[in-house]
Amino acid sequence: MQDNIFLKIIRKEIKTDFLYEDDEVLAFYDIHPIAPVHVLIIPKKPIQSIAQMSEEDSPIIGKMFWVARNIAKDLNISEKGYKLLIRVGKDGGQEVPHLHLHLLGGARLAENIHPV
Ligand code: 5GP
């Protein structure tokens, strides 16, 4: 897997404030938010996307959702609701080739899923 911006964040070569960190998972605010709350949750393991995950990665991906759920609670968006989004590959609109879960909330969000 080629180097990318999230691997640099994991290696702490790019200074980033973390909302959460453990041995497996990191969470931080998206640099270009598309919602009032926009957090990215990523695995530390270099997994390119859901398409490239293996069965043994399932617990890490479950952990990413658990962390998203807890951050949503901490940021007080849990009650009103939020969106969890994972883009996969080119047609899915994935730009950074390292698996990431978007936590989007703080406002009612439009669906906006159209072919380009
Ligand atoms: P994708 O389109 O691949 O699902 O999402 C990649 C996300 O990473 C985008 O929302 C983009 O704004 C975010 N991003 C790209 N580079 C950086 C960075 O250096 N720092 C942070 N915090 N977010 C980034």
Image (cartoon, rainbow, N blue to C red):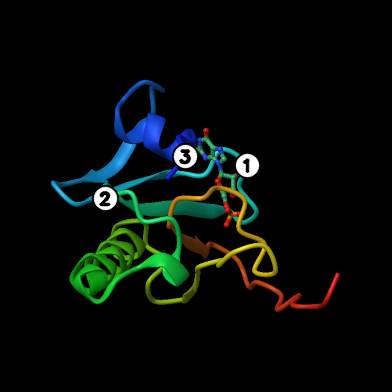
**Three-letter amino acid code of the residue under disc 3:** Gln
Q: Nearer the viewer, residue 72 or 43?
A: 43
Rendered residue at 46%/43% (across/down):
29
Question: Dots 1 and 2: beta carbons under 8 Å?
Answer: no
Q: Residue 101: x and y, percent?
A: 43, 62
Dot 3, how many residues are within 10 Å of its Cα: few (below 14), some (14-19), or many (20+)? few
Quarter of the figure that contains the N terminus: top left
Q: Residue 110: x and y, percent?
A: 71, 75
Residue 45 numbered tag: 2
Rendered residue at 63%/73% (across/down):
108
**Three-letter amino acid code of the residue under disc 2:** Lys
Q: CA distance from mark 3 to mark 1?
A: 23 Å
Q: Earlier in the sequence, mark 3 or mark 1?
A: 3
Residue 2 numbered tag: 3
Q: Is residue 78 left or right of residue 81?
A: left
**Three-letter amino acid code of the residue under disc 1:** His
The answer to whether mark 1 is within 8 Å of ligand 1 is yes
Question: Dots 2 and 3: beta carbons under 8 Å?
Answer: no
Residue hosting label 1: 32
Q: Earlier in the sequence, mark 2 or mark 3?
A: 3
Residue at the extreme front = 1
Rendered residue at 60%/58% (across/down):
94
Q: Is residue 27 left or right of residue 92?
A: left
Disc 2 is placed on an element classified as loop
Select label 1 or label 2 by which is in front: 2
Q: Residue 44: x and y, percent?
A: 27, 47
Residue at the extreme left = 23
Q: CA distance from mark 2 to mark 3?
A: 13 Å
Q: Is residue 34 left or right of residue 5?
A: right
